[in-house]
Image (tube, rainbow, N blue to C red):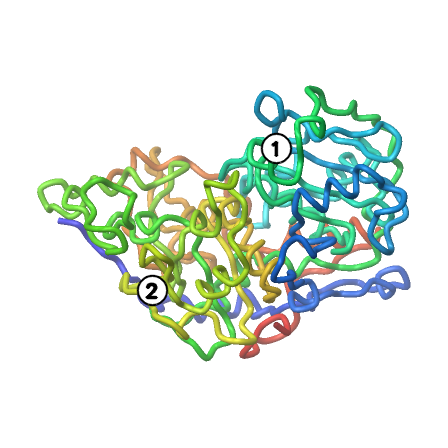
Amino acid sequence: MNMRINKGLTGLTVLAMAMGLHGCGGGGEDKSSTASQIVVNTPAMLAQVSADDYNQNVNGLITAATLKRWKDDWTNQRPAGITGKLVIIQVTAGPAGAEYIKPNGSNVFTYLSPGSEWTQVRTNGVIETIQVVPDGAQMDGIFKKYNIDPTKDMIVVAMGTGSTGNAMAQGRVWYALRYWGVDKKNIAILNGGNQWLNGNGLAAEDFQAAASTAPNNGVFSVRQLMVDNTQLQATVEDMLRILPSSDVNVKNDGILIWDARSLAQYSAGEKLEFGEDTNTDVAGNQSCATAFCDPVNPNNYQQFFQNGGSRQGHPWGTLQLQYTHMLDSSKGWAYRPKAELAALLAGHTNAQGIGFVDGGYNLVGAGNAYQEGDTIYAYCETTFRAMITGVVSAVILGKPTRFYDGAMVEWNSLSYLPDQNGNYLLPADSPWRTDIKSFYRPAASNTLVAPRTITNAYATTTNAAINADKAYKTGETIGGGGGGGGGGAPSNPCGG
């Protein structure tokens, strides 16, 4: 029979001792004159509010009409405070006839830069994790390749061909730039894919078949960005600290943890959202498909696992609303109107009756999702889908937002469960076991579980990458134990 596992709190005392319960912004930096000049921004400081009419934005989420005005007369139309070039980054080519937004070769350039260029395999000190924010050297290489000066240039991130995957990649570029300290006035996300923009703000003459050639002569380094935006990222240490003691929706804790995956993954196959399977009920009725609830076929839930995971489910206290509901497929996967997104965040349902659900797979209802002042923690399997939900919260709605970049591929790997070789991923006494604060269903067989690279099951912190990034920027040594933030666990972490 199917087994729903909610582990108890065994080992959490050891976990708290090992973690030191680091919060947002502190840590063990060895601060010198260089480090002391750097301004540390909280998630609240990093959030920006879009205009109700996206046409009015000059950064954040912009429209094709705004981009056309810029590119046709960049010298006279560029936004206040921008003195450099207009650099358009497309994560893919568009379809035939709308491949690349046309540059002028003097102060407007369009480059192809796939989302994979903006991620990196890194270790957090405990485990090696795929597809997290790049380190400083990789970012400097990107600035060199495309000759970007992010203090002067305007960087517009475009999808090329509109799709959910390309909207995710678009978000990864935005996230990497913001994480490393690029100011919000220097970054814009172009709303919608080229196939829709051609005829909706841009015309055929605004496109060409080839991208600009990357000059590979830039000299800018992230070390010149004298801000610390690393609180944009949450680590597994932060996540373990903020989770409630059971799988319930706590409204007064100053936190909303947003699972951007499908309801099927969130529930490990116990519930499916309309459209996820042909056996679901009428539109809007979030229900269990017979094929996946029938005890005769108890292992069908395995199809919702990804990346050879040891388990599937969700951290305690998280709410689920799939990222696809943020986008309009009829408009090149553009973001939906601000009012619609704000209503969903507050707990309302859309026209199909879909909205946030809790650990019992019930709609939370209006007023029971985001609470004013909450910090949003966004995640999915690899924090690609969560780039879309995070752009909604941080760039459109202006809510304090952090991205759990390790995401479920990391979370599900920090388990006292065996892999395909019969080796337990983590020992039973590791302080980093996330299975003890999760609802999950284990893999149907350990033969389906991929081995993981565990670097130190007893590490004192999971903030190794963030600490390394701080050190890269200052050129100074980072002391032990620092975190995504300062001491304790306030009711609203990170000042959001």
Instruction: Residue 346 in the image: state x and y as whole percent.
Output: 45, 69
Quadrant in which residue 355 is drawn: bottom left
- The crowd level at tag 1 (other Cα within 10 Å; few <14, some 14-19, many 20+) is some
Q: Is residue 116 visible?
A: no
Of 468 and 389, the residue lying toward us: 389
Q: Answer with mark 1 or mark 2, whichever residue precedes in sequence.
A: 1
Quadrant in which residue 233 is drawn: bottom right
Residue at image mark 1: 198
Q: Is residue 367 visible?
A: yes
- What amino acid is at disc 2? Asp
Query: At 35% from the left edge and 57% from the top edge, which residue is drawn?
Result: 351
- What amino acid is at disc 1? Asn
Q: Is residue 207 left or right of residue 318?
A: right
Residue at image mark 2: 358
Of 440 and 79, the residue lying toward us: 79
Tell me how far mark 1 sits from mark 2, CA to CA.
40 Å
Image height of 140 relative to 151, above or below:
above
Query: At 63% from the left edge and 54% from the top edge, which residue is drawn?
Result: 54
Instruction: Residue 361 in the image: state x and y as whole percent.
Output: 28, 61
Query: At 18% from the left edge and 47% from the top edge, which residue is drawn?
Result: 289
Image height of 82 relative to 164, above or below:
below
